[in-house]
Image (spheres, rainbow, N blue to C red):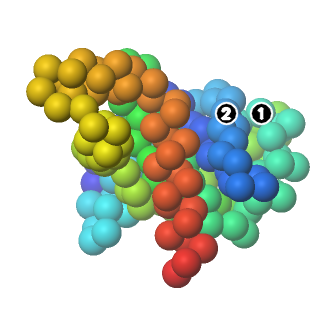
Amino acid sequence: MKTFRLISLQIILMEKNKVIHRSVPLQDGLIINREESNSSWLIEAVIPAEEKDFLKEIKNQKLVFEVIITERSNEPALMTGNIRQLTDLSENYSLMIDAKMAAGKDDVSNLILEGIVQDGYSGEELLNEFMYRKNDQMEWSKKLAEKIYKEIKDS
């Protein structure tokens, strides 16, 4: 098992066919790669008590999460999973999530390239457009989340 510090946790929700990022404020957090089959991860975060009601509301749903580990400058990864447990810690709550890797930076790059090729770019223009689009990480996370939620719905 490998353990990393959780820097950022966002829950990406699909509401009325629109992707919404909901940031989860972290007091502290870890993410553990259990190194089992299917890229199994365990996320544990200490969160403020005011997040409890929202998390209880979505507890039984299959969700998409965007996480950043180790350093804020790292690229985010998309994961799917379920909230396993919410535990009262007197002033805060412990949030535990069972997750699997759904998309990493290669998936984002592939999605960006597909779009650029479909838009007719080639050569030097393709490279410039790729660099430009890659800078809009939030937009690509939304597009990947839409794709993941569609796959969840269809399965």
Secondary structure state at the residue bearing disc 2: strand
Which residue is rendered at x = 64% and y = 27% of the image?
27
Q: Quarter of the image holding residue 57?
A: bottom right
Q: Residue 14 location in percent, x, y?
A: 69, 54
Whether pointer 2 and pointer 1 mark residues with C-beta atoms closer than 8 Å, the reply is no
Q: Residue furthest left?
A: 123
Which residue is rendered at x = 87% and y = 49% of the image?
53
**Disc 1 packing (10 Å; few <14; some 14–19; many ≥20):** some
Q: Quarter of the image holding residue 90?
A: top right
Secondary structure state at the residue bearing disc 1: strand
Q: Name the residue carrying label 2.
A: 23
Which residue is rendered at x = 55% and y = 54% of the image?
146
Residue type, numbered disc 1: Pro
Q: Is residue 107 left or right of residue 65?
A: left
Residue type, numbered disc 2: Ser
Q: Name the residue carrying label 1.
A: 48
Figure quadrant of the N terminus: bottom left
